[in-house]
Structures are given as C-alpha cells and as structure tokens.
Image (spheres, grey):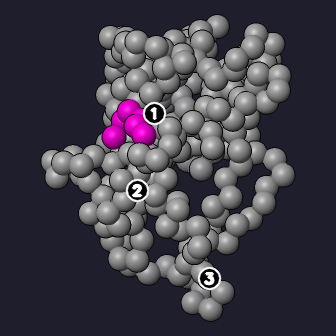
C-alpha cells in the first residue's frame, strides 16, 4: 500500500495520479439512474484545502443547490493524518471534537473509510487516461529534474494560452460562466499563495498575468464563491501535509492577496 497519494510516481520520477474509478451520476430519470435526484438523499464530504472538493462547494453555491436540496457539509482536517492504526497510510481524516464537525453521519474517521464503505456499492469504470488539468501537482511532486522541467513548461504554456484567451472574452468559453471556469479557478486561487512556493511554480506569478489575475478576482466575487475559499485551510494543508517538500511544516506569512479588490472583467459586459 502506498503511504500516501504522493507515492504515485513513474519510473522517471514523474508524479502520475491514478485515475479515479469512483464514478456515478445523479439523474432525474427514475428508471435508469443508479443515483436518482432526490432531496435529502445525498451528503457532501469535503476538505476546504482540496481544490477538487472546494469546487464542489462552488457548484452548490453558483447553482443554488445548497438551497434547493438538503445536504450535509462535513469537513476534513486540513493536515493529513494516519487513516488507520494498522498501517502507515496518510490522508484526509475527520476531527474528533464536536466543535470541529466530526463525521456524525457514518462515524468514519477518514475519507479512506468512506471509500471502503462504498466499494461494494459502486460500479467501477476503467479510464485509460487521467483527466488533464493545469499540472501544478506534476511540478511539485516530481522527484527528478527532467519531469519537473517538462511539467513546468507545459504549465506555463497553458497559462499563456489562458491569458491570451481572456484578452478577448470574459470567461474561458465566452461570455458565460461554465464548468471550465470553476475547474480553473480552484487552481488559480491557490497559485501565488501556495503553488508558486511549495510546488516551485515561480517562473511567473499569477499577478504577472493581468487578465488571469483579474479573472480570478471576478470569479471569487460571484455571490457564494468566496465562502468556498478557506485560505487558512489551504495553506495549512499543503505546507503541513507534505514533509518530503516542506519537512518542517513552516507556513509562509504572505502574500495575503485581496481577491475582493476591484477587477476589470466587467468591461466585456458593456
């Protein structure tokens, strides 16, 4: 068993995340859906420190689903811990104090336990290729120079393309907010605060891209989105959970960017 997800390395020293096999869809079709759309049926487990989890909260806020359906928000602790006493695996764990939102729904001590509960209930779907995204993790978790150089080159090529696209339009796919924007936002919001330092993505800061930086502030200021960003959790997790990168767990004090400051993206709606 891998000690943590960070052990998913190729022979060349590149970080290669195993594709998720937990896939299911909520549908209004009462006959064909394994997961029917039903109020009060679903509960959301998240970590405010995880960009994939925080984007789920953003979808709830943007779509108004936090008001339309019942859900329970159960948050993990920001810093990884041992998920079981029987091995050395490190991952997301739940608080044990009632003041810190323990898992009162399933009584799980970790996200690992939830997956183990769900294994017999889920249909596994194989994926030949991992999903593509801005590769900050491939930069930060690389263990050799060559895969790091390759990852950081691809990362900044992607950022340059984003900057160019946002010169012509307010959002990534045009004039309307789409899933592409939410997926991109959760990486951008942590870029200068974490990835530039912790993952060695310092070739150019987000603030060096005028369009991307204002775009990030624009999305942050969409009603409900700012409440999904907990920068304290984000910084405590990254700087405190990866001893191979930051052995002393020291958390930098800055740069403390104000994403509620004015932006210029509304010029596209005039």
Q: Residue at x 62, y 82 (%)?
A: 33
Q: Residue at x 61, y 32 (%)?
A: 6
Which residue lies at the image location 58% right of the left edge and 42% below the top edge?
183
Residue position marked by numbered label 3 in the rendering? 33
The question of residue 78 being in magenta is answered with yes
Tell which circle, 3 or 2, labels the residue nearer the N-terminal end: 3
Query: Which residue sits furthest front?
Result: 86
Q: Position of residue 253 (x, y in %)?
A: 32, 11
Q: CA distance from mark 3 to mark 2?
A: 22 Å
Mark earlier in primary sequence (3, 1) = 3
Q: Is residue 22 above or below residue 248?
A: below
- What residue range appears in magenta? 77-82
Q: Residue furthest left?
A: 99
Q: Which residue is mark 1?
A: 218
Position of residue 102 measured from the top left corner of the image (x, y, whole percent): 26, 54
| Residue for badge 2 | 45
Determine the image quadrant of residue 92: top left
């Amino acid at each position: 068993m891998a000690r943590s997800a960070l052990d998913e390395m190729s022979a060349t020293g590149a970080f290669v995340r195993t594709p998720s096999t937990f896939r299911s869809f909520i549908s209004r079709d009462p006959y064909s859906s394994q997961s029917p759309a039903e109020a009060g049926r679903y509960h959301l487990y998240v970590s405010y420190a995880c960009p994939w989890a925080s984007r789920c909260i953003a979808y709830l806020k943007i779509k108004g689903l936090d008001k339309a359906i019942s859900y329970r928000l159960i948050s993990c602790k920001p810093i990884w811990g041992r998920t079981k006493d029987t091995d050395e695996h490190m991952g997301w764990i739940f608080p044990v104090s009632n003041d810190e939102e323990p898992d009162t729904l399933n009584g799980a001590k970790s996200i690992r336990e939830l997956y183990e509960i769900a294994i017999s209930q889920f249909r596994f779907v194989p994926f030949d290729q991992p999903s593509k995204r801005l590769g900050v993790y491939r930069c930060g978790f690389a263990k050799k120079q060559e895969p790091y150089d390759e990852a950081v080159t691809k990362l900044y090529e992607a950022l340059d393309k984003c900057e160019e696209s946002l010169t012509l339009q307010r959002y990534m796919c045009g004039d309307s907010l789409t899933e592409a924007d939410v997926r991109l936002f959760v990486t951008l919001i942590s870029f200068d605060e974490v990835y530039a330092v912790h993952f060695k993505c310092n070739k150019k800061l987000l603030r060096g891209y005028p369009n991307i930086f204002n775009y990030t502030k624009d999305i942050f200021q969409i009603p409900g989105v700012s409440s999904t960003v907990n920068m304290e959790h984000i910084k405590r997790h990254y700087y405190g959970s990866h001893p191979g990168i930051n052995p002393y767990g020291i958390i930098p004090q800055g740069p403390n960017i104000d994403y509620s400051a004015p932006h210029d993206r509304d010029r596209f709606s005039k």
